[in-house]
Amino acid sequence: MASVTLENLQKTYPNGFKAIHGVDVDIQDGEFLVLVGPSGCGKSTLLRMIAGLETITDGSLSIGGKAVNDLEPSKRDIAMVFQNYALYPHMTVYNNMAYGLKIMGLSKDEIDQRVKNAASILELTDEQLSRKPRQLSGGQRQRVAMGRAIVRKPSVFLFDEPLSNLDAKLRVQMRVEIKQLQESLGITSVYVTHDQVEAMTLGHRLMVLNAGNVEQLGTPLELYEKPASLFVAGFIGSPAMNILDATVAEDGKSVVIGTDTVLPVGANGVEGFDGKPVKLGIRPEHLEITPGAEGALPLTVTLVEHLGADTLLHGHFGNDKTDLTLRQSGTHLAKAGEVLPITITPNHIHLFDPETEKRIDF
Amino acid sequence: MIENRPLLKIFSHIILILGVIMVAFPLWVTFVASTHDATRMTELPLPLLPGSHFFENLDRVLFVGLYGGDASGMGYMLLNSTIMALMIAIGKIIISLLSAFAIVYFRFPFRMFFFWMIFLTLMLPVEVRILPTFEVVANLGMLDTYWGLTVPLIASATATFMFRQVFLTIPDEMLEAARIDGAGPLRFFKDILLPMSRTNIAALFVILFIYGWNQYLWPLLVTTDQSMYTVVMQIGNMLEAGEEAPQWHLIMMITLLAIIPPVLVVVAMQKLFVQGLTETEK
Amino acid sequence: MLKRVHFEPSLLPYLLVAPQIIVTIIFFIWPASQALFQSMLVEDAFGLKTEFVWFQNFEELFADPHYWGSFQRTFIFSFLVAGLSMSIALLLATMADRVIKGSGIYRTLLIWPYAVAPAAAGALFFFLFNPTLGFIPYTLQFFGYDWNHKINGDEAMALIIFAAAWKQIAYNFLFFLAGLQSIPKSLIEAAAIDGAGPSRRFWTIIFPLLSPTTFFLLVVNVVYAFFETFGIVDAMTAGGPANSTQILVYKVYNDGFVGLDLGGSAAQSAVLMAIVVALTVFQFRFVEKKVEY
């Protein structure tokens, strides 16, 4: 059990490419931190730096209060689960799990006890333990990869997109298992994924990375309710947040969409943007169909998607061609071409500075 | 089959059978010759069906010697050939495995320089640098030794490239997982890399054994002591001698002995052989 | 080219490459540079004095009609070996691709000559074509043809071509068969639906799709005929009669070891090296192209 501290961690490749621009985070003992972002954002690099598979260019990394910058991976008291599992194809499942322990120099009994214990946690049978990895299904291989991590009894678990090779149904199942396992073992975990649903459901905290920079660090709900930037707003939540062009009124008390839709902003208005253009964000579930409401915006429906529990309506406001998505719970029998009156709930809007793309608090 | 044309199928079989006969005919004639006695082998037309002197001829060639009293048979040449083929095959595999491992899994100064140096050997078959190589071996006092017979043929770019290719297809995560498991370079090599490449090693072994066994020019040059002769080089000597005293039944028996071991290897390990052949060409 | 992760730099990688590098330097690079150096030396008749003569050996070499003759013979030999062996192999591979039953057996029965040493292949054909006893000359007599490769240079050349091509059929067959089997069946089926018969399908669909394999094999066969047929020549004809089968590799050996013309032999080695380099580069560029397919 240990905390992991990253201080101004940086990575520059020999060719000059700067992959990580300086990350600070204090991962608590027992915390589940998810690194999330689009491919190429540096999340895997960061994880591999913690693992010791990539060198650290600058900054410091400590695990359990001990600086580990220059330690070999095996000396960092970590275990890692790889995207393609990286099981040794020529060894049985048992030996895959036991290999690291043998190198540690543990006794045969100790190794056997640890492997058997991990196998029972992961519900791997004795018969499966004697098989080769290629004779197992995807889900079973995934379990073996986790087993290999568990037997090491590490202070930190590192997961590198461990579920991305599984089919959708299995992915949900394994996601739940990983969550339960982490909670019951209480081991500090760092988990990399590009799937925001995975990130939201697994993490105590999420770190959103973009082009080697930390966009935001916070709990799933913080990210959802107060995205720190346009990037986070667009990345967290599915379907993505709608973004519209708007202007702050001269008095700063309201924002104007188009020419005549005026929405009040908070109790005190917004400071410093009087009369300036802003980006206005509104989540699909915060657009309401309000027949007969005053000042409703006319949404021309272009496409209707029925998801069963929800209905997604795609469309645009009048001549504004910005595509919008509206989520309506239950079934809504709208048709393409129909025009629906839409109301935006003012206390659910988000404002962003179009220059810096940062959130404007109000 | 796209369409069912029995005639076409029969035609294909006929062509194939003719091909097999054409390919096998020279060997058949040789085999038949090795089963007759000296007298029969001077009468025209030569036989096309086996006779009854096979074991007699075999015994003579292996244990008695060709011209009676001159030597003690040539069984030892089979042994020499086997030793040479094994030394070349195993030696090549070992040094190629090691250098490919270094080149793929380490970053070190002069890595590319070494890589190109090995690449050069691809371009220098022994036939084109024969004289100076001979001089080097002579100066090192390696004439008439197994080392002189094999070491100069051991450096091989082909095998190094093949292992490099094999290592490159092994996922990076194998090394990463091994490092997290605490395996150092040599341990990784022994526990992960070698077992994962074992069919490639076996396939290459088949090809290299044949290569080694079939060496002709090099043994011809570096051996002067009869006890170091190999079977294949002996064929040349025998054909020359055959001009004066044609003992075709014995000469063909020697040829047969030179042919059969590598052919058996190919036939018995056909799958590995095909794999090795296609892999070394990548 | 390189793994994402490496082991820490240490002395170890140097130790690992050392055996190969040492062997390469002692038995490849040093002798090859010796050959290049010697190609610019002339030794007097008693081997007492050597003189550095720059490119004189090369000039003499290229002025020597015997050398050009050998060059010409080597080219004829190489292309006939490649052509003969590849056409037979392609025919057999096409047939083997067609039959489903027994194609494995045919393969086994056709690939074994690969394992036969060139010198041994020479012995097989030497016996088969022996002018006094051999089966083929005996048969040819009935057609009024008198075969004697010991006198007739063309026949001697034909003989080494037969032996060299015979041995190479196995290799070509395997690669052609693999090439044929990698052609998607759907393409052939589409052509059949378009109404193309077997032979039309072969020439318009299969053969063009096989062209990378064919081209690759052509290079490999030429390299084989150039450098790996020493044993065949030495065992069967020793370059004779009257040098009619003296191909380049044989001439290097003959001039160097028998004629003891060190400078001339070394100059020939240098020329051969240039040819190998050219062929290898050619082959590599082609392999790169093949990747694009």
Image (spheres, grey):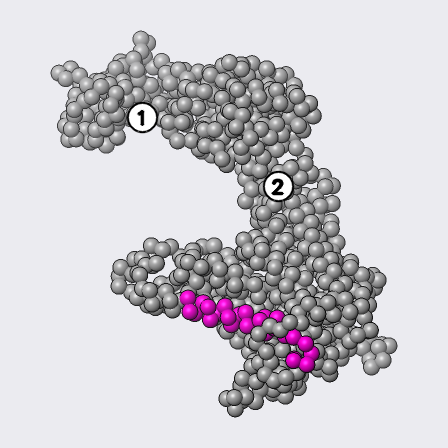
| Residue projecting furthest to the left | A292
Vertical relation: B29 (above or below) C23: below
Residue B133 x, y percent position in the rendering: 75, 65
Task: Tell me the residue at 66%/45% (across/down).
Answer: B102
Task: Tell me the residue at 59%/83% (across/down).
Answer: B45
Disc 1 and disc 2 in contact, CB within 8 angstroms? no
Q: Nearer the viewer, mark 1 or mark 2?
A: 2
**Residue tagged 1:** A239
**Residue tagged 2:** B195
How many marks can you see? 2
Residue C267 left/right relative to A210: right
Q: Which element type, helix, strand or loop, lies under badge 2? A: helix
- Host chain of mark 2: B
Residue C40 left/right relative to C249: right
Characterize the magenta stretch by its predominant secondary structure: helix
What's the residue type where badge 1 is placed? Pro
**Crowding at label 2, few (<14), some or many (≥20) Cα neighbours within 10 Å?**
some
Q: Is circle 1 on the same chain as circle 2?
A: no
Task: Tell me the residue at 31%/61% (across/down).
Answer: B4
Residue C282 left/right relative to B253: left
* First to last magenta residue range: B13-41
| Residue projecting furthest to the front | B52
